Amino acid sequence: MKHVLRICLFTLLMALATPCFALMEIAWVTPKEAKELGIDLRIAESGPDAVRVELQFKPEGQFKDFQHVSLEIAEGGKDLLGYAPLKEKRSESGKITVGFWVARSYLDKITLRIVAGTGLSYSGHDLRLKEFIKPENAR
């Protein structure tokens, strides 16, 4: 009986130690906070019905252990697309840039999440594009 109990306990401990049980602390980032964190989010026209979105930051401070930037789309409280990692480019100066283009009608539905961390401790910094939109990009 002791042997079976030890095996069960060992299995439980091994399962709890896997990354799939990691928790992520998520913070909403305002445009003011983004500036303080060194995040540059630009939205520029890209044709009559689309805009180009570009996010740039340095992997330092809270982003020291940078993992990825993901794109999420939600409408009416329902997730339409989640955890879509974006390919990043690293400049010679060390900055990380991700970008994409999107129809203007989707701007208010998109959130970008910068994920950083290691082991069982991750943080997500969420940027809701609708908070960063300038009127000339929203028409």
Image (cartoon, helix red, strand yellow):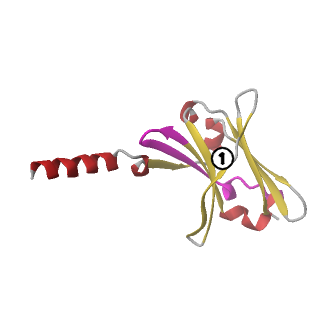
Identified at 50% across, 39% down, the residue is 117
Residue 93 is covered by the magenta coloring: no
Establish if 63 lies above or below 92.
Answer: below
Q: Quadrant of residue 109?
A: bottom right
Front residue of this view, candidates 6 and 106: 6
Label 1 SS: helix
Highlighted range, magenta: 116-136
Front residue of this view, candidates 20 and 33: 20
Q: Which residue was labeled with disc 1?
A: 31
61 displayed left or right of 5 = right
5 displayed left or right of 30 = left
Q: Amino acid at mark 1?
A: Pro
Identified at 84% across, 58% down, the residue is 136
88 displayed left or right of 62 = right
User: Looking at the picture, how far across and down is residue 135, in whole percent?
Assistant: 79, 58
Front residue of this view, candidates 72 and 44: 72
Identified at 86% across, 55% down, the residue is 45
Front residue of this view, candidates 101 and 6: 6
Residue 117 is covered by the magenta coloring: yes
User: Looking at the picture, how far across and down is residue 105, in whole percent?
Assistant: 76, 68
**Image quadrant in which the C terminus is located:** bottom right
